[in-house]
């Protein structure tokens, strides 16, 4: 497995792969891998002849009071895990490589980024789309793989790719969960044992939403109420948002119909967790 630190190195790797007639898959990540990341890499391995994983904690998508400085890192462990699932190249650039002096261009998807995570994390999605656009330009993948745990992120990236004619396929894959339902996330390690136990309320509330819809409930306010009441009952849980919106446009709904997402962000102490479920109604 090749480790590339510069744009020139990863471009060179991709040039050689293309010359050998290979398709290229990209899995963009911020590292500290778990089974969710590995499921994306395995899928990329199945569908593409050359697999690149980018590993970069992108400062542009963190707010000034967020966890950039303490974001978990273990480059050696990440490389070993990526090698084991058959990744061909890791692209792990420095901040200077990604944002050299004078950097002043951003990519921004408007409208769908000013709700859900975009409300409490202003500028977050501009940071995500800017870095992902740079990664797409460097790697020129045929397919790029994202997890559905960040449902809004996946929809925003799909929109960017469509709007800017980026000519690649965005593949989104199901959220990988712990046995008790908690969505896998690099940030789960911040939780103390008590918070970790209570954090299963995110999954339980999404399951309650699905069950209520299956019983015939269509009123978005009442469905939201079911989730809010359940989360409020968990010790130490601070709700940031619980929303039910249309997919893919993320418009608010009074009565649910068609493809909808129930999405939530909940804080346990300083740790912010997100989860969602998408249903066809
Ligand atoms: O989902 C993530 O890990 C990040 O937002 C991404 C897509 C790698 C961009 O930094």
Image (spheres, rainbow, N blue to C red):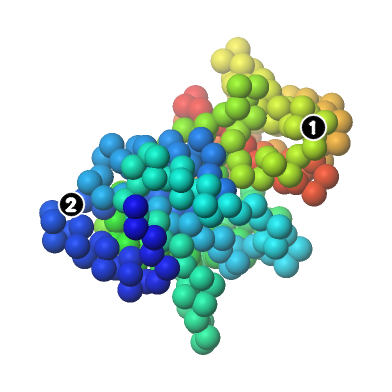
- Please name the residue shown 18% across and 59% down the image: 18
Question: How many numbered discs sit on the rendered protein?
Answer: 2
Image position of 161 (left or right of 272): left
Q: Residue furthest bottom?
A: 102
Answer above or below: position of 244 versus 30: above
- Please name the residue shown 76% across and 63% down the image: 65
Image position of 134 (left or right of 58): left
Mark 1 crowdedness (10 Å alpha carbons): few <14, some 14-19, many ≥20? few
- Please name the residue shown 47% across and 75% down the image: 97
Q: Nearer the viewer, residue 77 or 270?
A: 77
Q: Where does residue 249 sit, x and y in percent of width and height? A: 49, 47
Task: Give the residue number, with chain letter if any, for mark 2.
Answer: 22
- Please name the residue shown 77% across and 27% down the image: 197
Q: Where does residue 90 sit, x and y in percent of width and height? A: 40, 56
Q: Nearer the viewer, residue 74 or 114?
A: 74
Return the disc, 1 or 2, that comes first in the chain's sequence.
Answer: 2
Instruction: Report whether residue 53 is seen.
Output: yes
| SS state under label 2 | loop
């Amino acid at each position: 497995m090749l480790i590339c630190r510069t744009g020139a190195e990863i471009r060179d790797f991709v040039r050689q792969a293309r010359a050998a007639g290979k398709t290229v898959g990209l899995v963009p990540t911020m590292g500290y891998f778990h089974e969710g990341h590995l499921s994306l890499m395995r899928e990329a391995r199945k569908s593409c002849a050359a697999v690149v994983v980018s590993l970069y904690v992108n400062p542009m998508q963190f707010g000034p009071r967020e966890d950039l400085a303490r974001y978990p890192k273990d480059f050696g462990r990440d490389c070993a895990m990526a090698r084991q699932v058959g990744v061909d190249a890791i692209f792990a650039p420095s901040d200077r490589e990604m944002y050299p002096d004078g950097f002043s261009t951003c990519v921004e998807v408007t409208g769908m980024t000013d709700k859900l995570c975009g409300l409490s994390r202003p500028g977050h999605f501009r940071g995500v789309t800017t870095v992902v656009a740079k990664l797409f330009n460097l790697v020129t993948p045929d397919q790029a793989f994202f997890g559905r745990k960040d449902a809004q992120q996946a929809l925003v990236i799909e929109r960017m790719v469509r709007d800017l004619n980026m000519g690649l396929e965005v593949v989104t894959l199901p959220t990988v969960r712990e046995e008790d339902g908690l969505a896998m996330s690099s940030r789960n390690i911040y939780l103390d044992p008590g918070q970790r136990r209570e954090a299963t309320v995110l999954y339980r509330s999404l399951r309650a939403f699905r069950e209520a819809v299956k019983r015939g409930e269509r009123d978005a306010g009442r469905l939201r109420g079911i989730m809010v009441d359940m989360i409020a009952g968990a010790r130490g849980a601070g709700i940031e948002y619980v929303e039910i919106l249309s997919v893919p446009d993320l418009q608010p709904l009074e009565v649910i119909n068609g493809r909808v997402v129930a999405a939530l962000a909940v804080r346990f102490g300083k740790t912010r967790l997100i989860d969602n479920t998408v249903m066809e109604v």
